[in-house]
Image: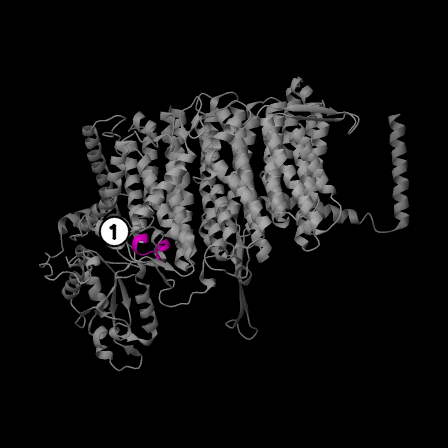
Amino acid sequence: MGVVPVGLWRKIVKTGRVAEPAPPPPACPPPVPELAGSVQLRHVDAGSCNGCEVEIGSAFGPVHDAERYGARLVASPRHADALLVTGPVTRNMEVALRRTYEAVPQPRLVVALGDCARDCGAFKGAYGVAGAVADVIPVDVHVPGCPPPPEAIVAALRGITGR
Amino acid sequence: MTATLVQLFVVVAGAPLLVGFMRQVRARLEGRAGAGVLQPWRDLRKLLRKEPITPHGTGWVFRSAPPLLAGTALVVAAVVPLVTTASPLDVAADLFTVAALLALGSVALALAGLDTGTAFGGMGASREMVVLALVEPTILLSVFALSIPAGSTNLAAIVESGVDLISPVTLLVAAALVVVTLAETGRVPVDNPSTHLELTMIHEAMILEYSGPDLALVEWAESIRLAVLLGLLAALFLPAGIAGAGAGPLALLVAVAAFALKTSALGALLAAGEVFMAKLRLFRIPELLAGSFLMALLAVAASYFLT
Amino acid sequence: MTLYVVALGLCLAAALVPGAGRVAAWIAGLLTASGGALAAVAGGLALAGHGWQTWLPDLLPPVGVRLALDPLGGLFVAVTGGVAACAAVYGIGRSGRVVPLFVAAMLLVPAAASVGTFLACWELMAITSLALVLTEHRERGAVRDAGLWYAILTQLGLVAVLCGLLLLGHDGFDQLRAADLPPAVRNAAFLATLVGFAAKAGIVPLHVWLPRAYPEAPAPAAALMSGAMVNMGVYGLLRVGLDLLGGGPEWWWLVVLGLGALSALYGILQAAVASDLQRLLGYSSTENMGLVLMGIGTAGLLPGSPAGRLALAAALLHVVNHAAFKTLLFQAAGSVTRTTGGRNLDAMGGLRTRMPYTTAIFAVGALCASALPPGNGFTSEWLLLQSLLHALPGSGVAVAVTMPLAVGVFALSAGLAVATFVKAFGVGFLARPRSQAAELATESPPTMLAGMTLAAAACVFLALNPGLVLSALPGAHPVGGLVTLELAGLTGSISPLLLAVAIAVAAAGVLAALRKTGRVRRAARLWDCGAGPMSARMEYTATSFCEPLQRVFDHTLAPEGGVDVRSAKESAYLVERVEFRASVPDRVERTLYGPVLAAARAAGERARRLADGSVHRYLGYGFYALTGALIVLAVLA
């Protein structure tokens, strides 16, 4: 398997923990009791400018570490409990989004991430946009911001997992 | 019998914890906080309460694969001497049988992947079968090399006879079996268990269609397989602490503790290794497996001439 | 003996049933089936020790026909009878009158007790099987090609067996056993017969007829040939090598072991990349016969030792198991071909909903053939592996060198067999249909299903009760116990029955525990990444399934293929047609037989110049030949 790179090891030791201390847990209980403590997310880019994607990456990165609260990104909507939808829903993604929602087993949640997902944001009225996420599938949680900061994303996810 | 039940319980309850522990080790090495050792159990609890889905166009093969996979994993967990060598099934199954049972579970999943008729399912099944076809010979040869000193392939006999830790045979077999374990459990560098990218998947691609309790069974069985294979590695090369026939409760307690310690240590090593390694390209994997096959072949040849 | 004669009589009567109508065909089929069943019982009785012998001096003068049934012959009669019963039920109303004749010939071969009788029966078996292969020669040209290959190889095999047995110089098998032959004669006889028997068993490099003949023969005939006839090669090897010649020097068995190992590996490698279902099954026969030969080779290497006895028992059990699952698989494959009209796995798929029964039966066969528990193939391969393991040092350098290699080959072929049968079952029967023929497939008629069910029942029985068969095998019993098989004199045990029960209990327990949890199951559309709908063309085919394997074994298989791009006349950038070709030719056939065939063809072309149609020239040939003969005679006198 090759020699363990000493440099990397030294770096791991020197860096230590980069995850920031956890803010206090959410006060209210999770909206769906079945999903307490564990929420798998399938991310759907319905037409985003990829600003939200960068923030999602940051939320699941080492600093904010959303995984420590029981949230995890997965590959298949069958494995998912919640959809993480970003961007206004473009016409090309409308059917795909609806089908993805259908593919998620019950009980399921939809998290609309960013201002575009809430009200199409800057793209409102554009010819290629079919509408906000809530126009296509029922939305349970909105995360405002353009793009929403990772802290807000993590807080929203903690609201679902209850941790 | 009691000892085997204890072993079965420890494996069944502890396997997800092992997975959680390994994720935790990885998280810490990456500077994260980690979701905690209990997270896999939380995931399983949640999945059990969710809705199972049968995709259109799938049939009994798709439906029966998870229980079959779990069934074989349970039988293997009852046979392999992890905590005790006095399994009532020891006469019914030996090390070859264990390898074949693990293969049976993989075959069930591969057929389920093919049954969905999706491109990803077929892709996963095809890749899994290639890896299996190349891993199987290494397992059989390693078993062979290990069983020559004991004169038997029965697990209790091998474990009780013990192995000479510094002989070249043992080292070669150990190296070969480590590669096999990585491949069988779908870890880096053969497969990446935490990938989200379908095209790089092997194992995960076959189970993309499972949800709810079905998925829970598959994930649970996979964690059992991981725990059993790591435990088997530990038992074969470091059998200290395993309770013999007619052991008292104290010996059993010691055995459980030793098993937990050994598998966690191996799991931690594995998780740490994953931090330092990247996944191999698919067509590089056969080279790795061929290397392990060669090591096993050398081990068999050496054991013929050295004993 | 009476039973055996009645069984033979029933088969002959079936061959002679007059008329060509449906009723006559039914009667013939029923007679053959009952003949096969009776023969199975007769063979079983011989196995149990009720052997017999007889001499019919008036048949086949001047030496007469000698028949005898000992336990070894009884085993092969029983297997043949069982396969014949299944195949006959399967083919009721459809099989011709050659099938019962073929069955009778195969029943006679293991009972022959003299060289003359043996050769006569062997030839009868060869000719009837050739007629069966050629059944559909009017419909397809490929049948004639396959028939030619088969005819040449089987007749060359007969010549080899004939030469070998005639070298021994006695007619009766009893005399041969007592004869004291010089080593050179024994060696020559063994090698010559080995060639003949290997050709019959489909051993590499004499296997080339097998992947050609099986796809072209009708399903019952293919089942009979692969389930029963290939065993006759094994029987011949055992009879001549171990019985008549009473064992031999080490190198004999090393050759057998080597041939077996080569066949096992090469056969399964070709099967793994084949996308023609029947061809795949044919190559799998080569693999399994290779494993049997490995067992026989080990048994010959270690005569009298527990490991040697174990190897022989494992080989014989594998013969029985292979007969059961291969009969089943060929019947199921035949049912698929009957309704879809094709053999290409790439064009199948989705047969699960249209042919549920055939699918379930093929699944049983595939499980057995991939040597996974709780299938029957697992037990015999396990025993074989144990015998290789216990052939410990102390048996000489040759054994110490060969055994690790043998285990390596065995292990590789075991892994590839799993991949092969996952492909055959998963791609052929599961998912969605990939062609219109597969979409319109219908379930087979009840008689075919009955034949398959019989074979499946035999597989299940053998899988759960190998102890019963092992205790009945001829020779010393190296394995004891009925439920738990314990190796006698060695340490090691296994219990297929307990194992099957344990898996079933565990799986059922898991299901029962999950019953209360979760919500109501829901049906939903496939996850097609939100795009869709997915067409069957997006599915993995047999070719794509084995592509990674093919790439891994690139150097051994030497696959051929390429992309042809035809562009328009106006510009090279305007593509009219893109064509992709891929095939995996049989490399042994190409490198070994290609030059021979080319040389023969060249010689034939040259000889054609001698016969140019001129009468004068022919008269001249006669004149010169006569003169030459006279001169030779004059010189000799």
Can residue B213 be found in the magenta stretch? yes
Q: Residue at x 50, y 56 (%)?
A: C351
Name the element at disc 1.
helix
State left or right for residue C542 relative to residue B294: right
Task: Residue A61 in the image: state x and y as whole percent.
Answer: 19, 59
Residue A73: x and y in percent read: 25, 59
Identity of the amino acid at label 1?
A: Leu
Residue at screen point 30% across, 62% down: A104
In the image: residue C468, left or right of residue B293: right
Chain at tag 1: B
Q: Is residue C24 visible?
A: yes
Q: Dot 1, crowdedness within 10 Å: few (<14), some or many (≥20)? A: many
Pinpoint residue C419: horizontal percent, then vertical percent. Answer: 45, 47
Quadrant containing the N terminus of chain C is: top right
Q: Which residues are magenta?
A: B205-214
Tell me which colouring the rendered structure shows. one colour
- Quarter of the rendering containing residue A148: bottom left
Residue of label 1: B44
Question: How many marks can you see?
Answer: 1
Report the front residue among A89 and C41: C41
